[in-house]
Structure formats: C-alpha cells, structure tokens
Image: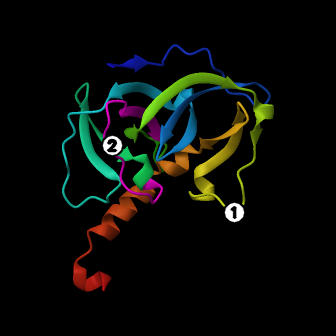
Amino acid sequence: MGELALKNSPAVYSEKEDYQYLTFSSGGDMFAIGILAIKEIIEYGNLTCVPMMPNFVRGVINVRGSVVPVIDLAARFGRKTSDVTRRSCIVIIEAKTENDDQQDIGVMVDAVSAVMEIPSKEIEPPPSFGSRIRVDFISGMAKIDHKFVIVLNVEKVLSVEEMTMISEMTNLPSDITE
C-alpha cells in the first residue's frame, strides 16, 4: 500500500465552493474528512504501545523522526477497538491544539475509499439526535450515491486537550476513581 501524499490538492475552502474529502470506513460506517487537514496515508504497522493510555490510543509511530500518536477512530467513538486487516491504514492528520499549535495525529481506519469532491449543497447539517457518535464530532451528513457519509469535525474528534484529559482520568489511582 505504501504512502499516498495529498499535499498538492487543488481544494480551496470557501463557503460557496465544493470541497474535496477523503472518504473511508471505520466500524462499519462511512466517514469523510476535508483533505486540507490530511498530510498523508500510510500502511498500518510498526506501532509502539504506550502503557496506561485510553483504549482508543493504539500507540505511537515514527513519521520522519516525529512521534505521532495513533487513535483508533472506532474506539474513539465508544465502539469496540478495530481489528487490523490488510486494508487497515493510518491517516495522518494535522490537528490544532488549544494554543493554535499544530500536532500530527494518526487515525486508524478500516479502509480508505476515495478522494472526492462533495458539493456543499449535498451536505446536510448534523442530526440533533439518533447518531451513534457525539453530535459535536459531526460537521455534516453528505449524500453520496443515495447513502449518508458522516463528515467529521476534525477539531472536535481529535481535540488534543480532550484526549489528554481522558488519558489523565484513565490514569488516576483506583482509590480516587472509586
């Protein structure tokens, strides 16, 4: 599979224009992320486990000398951890921190589908209820081939501050959490 760089994309974000999205599957659902947030896609492998992390943190990988945490998207959404298959891969996303710094985060997905342009008129607002993931994680619902694809709000799903807080809560001594 190797790497797929997405840096030279012609996508330009504007309220009235269509956007390009990477579509992929995770936990049986289809998702989309705007490609401007994506740095690259790499084959799943060579993860180093980090003790005492929440179940959605699969470990860390070395990407050109940088330590990059890898998040299991299905587990992040409260589902069971994903099984690793030959189509599993890691999408490297550039996420913003609370201080407007950039941090690369890897997202483990079941399979990448395609990069596609989704007209803004084909994206509905997120549902107010009934979704299997938190509503603030969804920026919209895209209609593609008469099916819905969940367009993720990367800043919420990959909030470094929230994941750090969850990690700290996970690592509390048992006498404090009981």
Residue 48 position, x and y percent, is 18, 42
The residue closer to the viewer here, 135 or 8, is 135
Which secondary structure, mark 1? loop
Would you say 31 lies left or right of 44 here? Answer: right
Q: Quadrant of the N terminus?
A: top left
Residue 160 seen from this side: no
Quarter assignment of residue 107: top left
Which residue has dot 2 on it? Answer: 70
Residue 102 position, x and y percent, is 43, 37
Which residue has dot 1 on it? Answer: 129
Which secondary structure, mark 2? strand
Which mark is nearer the camera, 2 or 1?
A: 1
Determine if the magenta segment contains residue 112: no
Would you say 46 lies left or right of 149 here? Answer: left
Q: Which residue lies at the image location 56% right of the left edge and 22% below the top edge?
A: 115
Q: Please, what is the three-letter code of the amino acid marked with disc 1?
A: Phe
Magenta stretch, residue numbers: 76-95
Q: Which residue lies at the image location 31% right of the left edge and 81% below the top edge?
A: 177
Height in image: 97 above or below 102? below
Would you say 112 lies left or right of 106 here? Answer: right
Q: Which residue lies at the image location 69% right of the left edge and 43% below the top edge?
A: 141
Residue 69 position, x and y percent, is 31, 43
Q: Earlier in the sequence, mark 2 or mark 1?
A: 2
Q: Dot 2: within a 10 Å radius of its alpha carbon, few (fewer than 14), some, or many (20 or more) residues?
A: many
Rounded to the nearest angstrom, the CA distance separating label 2 from label 1 is: 29 Å
Residue 22 position, x and y percent, is 55, 28
Q: Dot 1: within a 10 Å radius of its alpha carbon, few (fewer than 14), some, or many (20 or more) residues?
A: few
Q: Please, what is the three-letter code of the amino acid marked with disc 2?
A: Val
Quarter assignment of residue 151: top right
| Contact between labelled residues 1 and 2, with CB atoms less than 8 Å apart | no
Mainly helix, strand or loop, the magenta region?
loop
Q: Which residue lies at the image location 24% right of the left edge and 33% below the top edge?
A: 45
